[in-house]
Image (spheres, rainbow, N blue to C red):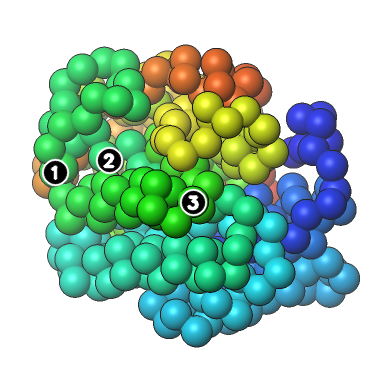
């Protein structure tokens, strides 16, 4: 993504935590291509070295291999930084249900370390990855930032606590913060492997191998699937806004439409069958509904449009077309 189209000038030193991950590495690439200096902090517990290999020789790139659970490492990473884009976290609802302690240590204690480091090193603004899981059991659609429900998983609790801590650091210490509630992000560099792989790359890999993808439940659950370039745009707009009403708050990051899982698989089969016509005939399997899953998710993006001038560039169809092209070339069987 060319972020110069957003009027973004190459003049900043930016810390991207979790910079070896799917979202973090895509943000890093966009910033470097625009002439900014980028520091990546990652312990590679979920991030991947192959995501950053092309950056390692870049003169404006620096890698700190470390853990946000260590305050000294966080402070070292924040030295001289203008902005922090905090992407580091242990994602996945099922993982948090299996191991709530580690999820809390990384997502809450690590987050607090980063806030303290940002405050002490006088970073201008702290933008962080929040989550649509914060809406919990709220049945209201579309999801509006000011109305949430009760959390449905340890992961959701940790992401809501992040928002509470960010608000306190804004009001108590004057640290500018913006939280971005991501809705089911997908795109290039997303890992299809592992027990907690995201649904789109996992389904792509299975269909590519002519294996039946397994949908949890009956396929009627729906999500606001959000292409990575929309996420990059929101991070950039959050960094550069000079609207005082736009800071110290949270935003939905989404396209603003929902797609059920049955439709998602049909769209994937349509795109993938351009490469292999046999994919059209792959059968779909159905399994048990996952614990902690919400039935439907749809974001209102009015607040982001009004305050940050957000204008999502990719619908799910446009995003899937680009993503599938990348997956076909890069995902190994």
- Where does the image place residue 26, in percent across and percent down from the top left? 65, 51
- Where does the image place residue 284, in percent across and percent down from the top left? 30, 33
Residue 286 in the figure: left or right of residue 272: left
Residue at 24% over, 61% down: 95
Q: Earlier in the sequence, mark 2 or mark 1?
A: 2
- Where does the image place residue 134, in percent across and percent down from the top left? 26, 40
Q: Mark 1 points at which residue?
A: 152
Q: Name the residue under label 2.
A: 133
Residue at 53% over, 64% down: 118
The answer to the question of whether label 2 and label 1 lie on touching residues, with beta carbons closer than 8 A, is yes
Residue at 61% over, 46% down: 188
Closer to the camera in the image, 331 or 110: 110
* Mark 3 or mark 1, whichever is nearer to me: 3
- Where does the image place residue 320, in percent across and percent down from the top left? 56, 30
Residue 168 in the figure: left or right of residue 286: right
| Position of 42 relative to 288 (above/below) | below
């Amino acid at each position: 993504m060319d972020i110069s189209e957003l009027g973004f000038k190459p003049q900043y030193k930016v810390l991207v935590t979790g910079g070896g991950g799917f979202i973090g590495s895509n943000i890093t690439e966009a910033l470097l291509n625009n002439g900014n200096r980028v520091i990546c902090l990652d312990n590679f517990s979920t991030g991947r070295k192959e995501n950053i290999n092309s950056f390692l020789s870049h003169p404006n790139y620096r890698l700190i291999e470390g853990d946000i659970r260590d305050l000294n490492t966080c402070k070292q990473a924040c030295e001289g930084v203008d902005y922090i884009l905090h992407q580091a976290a242990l994602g996945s609802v099922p993982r948090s249900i299996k191991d709530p302690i580690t999820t809390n240590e990384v997502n809450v204690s690590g987050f607090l370390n980063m806030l303290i480091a940002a405050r002490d090193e006088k970073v201008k603004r702290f933008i962080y990855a929040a989550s649509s899981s914060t809406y919990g059991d709220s049945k209201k659609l579309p999801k509006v930032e000011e109305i949430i429900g009760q959390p449905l998983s340890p992961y959701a609790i940790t992401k809501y606590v992040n928002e509470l801590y960010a608000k306190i650091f804004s009001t108590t210490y004057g640290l500018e913060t913006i939280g971005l509630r991501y809705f089911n992000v997908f795109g290039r560099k997303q890992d299809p492997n592992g027990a907690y792989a995201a649904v789109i790359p996992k389904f792509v890999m299975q269909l590519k191998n002519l294996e039946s993808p397994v949908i949890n439940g009956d396929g009627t659950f729906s999500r606001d699937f959000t292409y990575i370039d929309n996420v990059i745009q929101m991070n950039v707009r959050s960094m550069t806004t000079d609207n005082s009403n736009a800071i110290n708050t949270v935003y939905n990051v989404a396209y603003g439409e929902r797609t059920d899982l049955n439709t998602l698989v049909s769209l994937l089969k349509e795109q993938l069958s351009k490469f292999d016509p046999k994919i059209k005939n792959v059968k779909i399997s159905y399994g048990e509904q996952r614990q902690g899953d919400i039935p439907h998710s749809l974001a209102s993006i009015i607040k982001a449009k009004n305050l940050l001038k957000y204008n999502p560039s990719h619908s799910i169809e446009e995003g899937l077309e680009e993503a599938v092209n990348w997956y076909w070339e890069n995902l190994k069987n």
